[in-house]
């Protein structure tokens, strides 16, 4: 079983950010697929419409919104954890 966690953090002037949204899902091993570069993990989150978009870090130096995707497992034969920073953008036709 894999745990997927997606969160959006708004970073202010201080060292800590404010959690805007978080969702966690479990992915069963039966949903994993083997691709040309290794294991493929299906990722799908419904990010709420009020979540702010990622800003350009060069123009928004005091406040930055970032998305994080964390993948982890505590399987007996494989402990694994990795975190990716992902951009968050509004899509035309959504909230």
Image (cartoon, rainbow, N blue to C red):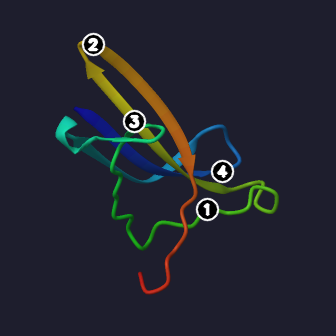
* Other-residue count near label 4 (Cα within 10 Å), few / some / many at <14 / 14–19 / ≥20: some
Task: Determine contact: label 1, label 3, CB under 8 Å.
Answer: no
Q: In this view, does 48 lie to the left or right of 56?
A: left
| Residue at numbered disc 3 | 71
Cα–Cα gap, marks 3 and 2: 16 Å
The front one of 84 and 9 is: 84
| Residue at numbered disc 2 | 77
Q: For residue 25, which numbered disc appears in the image?
A: none
| Residue at numbered disc 1 | 54
Secondary structure under tag 4 reads loop
Q: Is residue 61 left or right of residue 80?
A: right
Q: At 28% from the left edge and 34% from the top edge, which residue is drawn?
A: 2
Q: Is residue 25 left or right of residue 22?
A: left
The image shows residue 52 at horizontal and vertical percentages of 54, 67
The image shows residue 89 at horizontal and vertical percentages of 55, 69
The front one of 60 and 83 is: 83
Q: Is residue 62 above or below residue 30?
A: below
**The N terminus: image quadrant:** top left
Tell me which label, 4 or 1, sits earlier in the chain.
Answer: 4
| Residue at numbered disc 4 | 12
* Other-residue count near label 1 (Cα within 10 Å), few / some / many at <14 / 14–19 / ≥20: some
On the image, which quarter does residue 47 sit in? Answer: bottom left
The front one of 15 and 46 is: 46
The image shows residue 42 at horizontal and vertical percentages of 33, 50
Cα–Cα gap, marks 1 and 3: 21 Å
Task: Determine contact: label 4, label 1, CB under 8 Å.
Answer: no
Task: Determine contact: label 4, label 2, CB under 8 Å.
Answer: no
Q: Is residue 35 above or below residue 73?
A: below
Q: Of the residues tagged 4 and 3, which is closer to the observer?
A: 3
Secondary structure under tag 3 reads strand
């Amino acid at each position: 079983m894999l745990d997927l966690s997606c969160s959006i953090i708004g970073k202010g002037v201080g060292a800590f950010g404010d959690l805007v949204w978080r969702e966690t899902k479990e992915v069963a091993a039966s949903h994993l697929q083997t691709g040309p570069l290794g294991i493929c993990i299906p990722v799908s989150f419904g990010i709420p419409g009020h979540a702010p978009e990622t800003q350009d870090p060069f123009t928004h130096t005091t406040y930055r919104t970032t998305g994080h995707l964390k993948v982890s497992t505590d399987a007996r034969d494989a402990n694994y954890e990795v975190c990716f920073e992902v951009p968050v953008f509004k899509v035309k036709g959504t909230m």
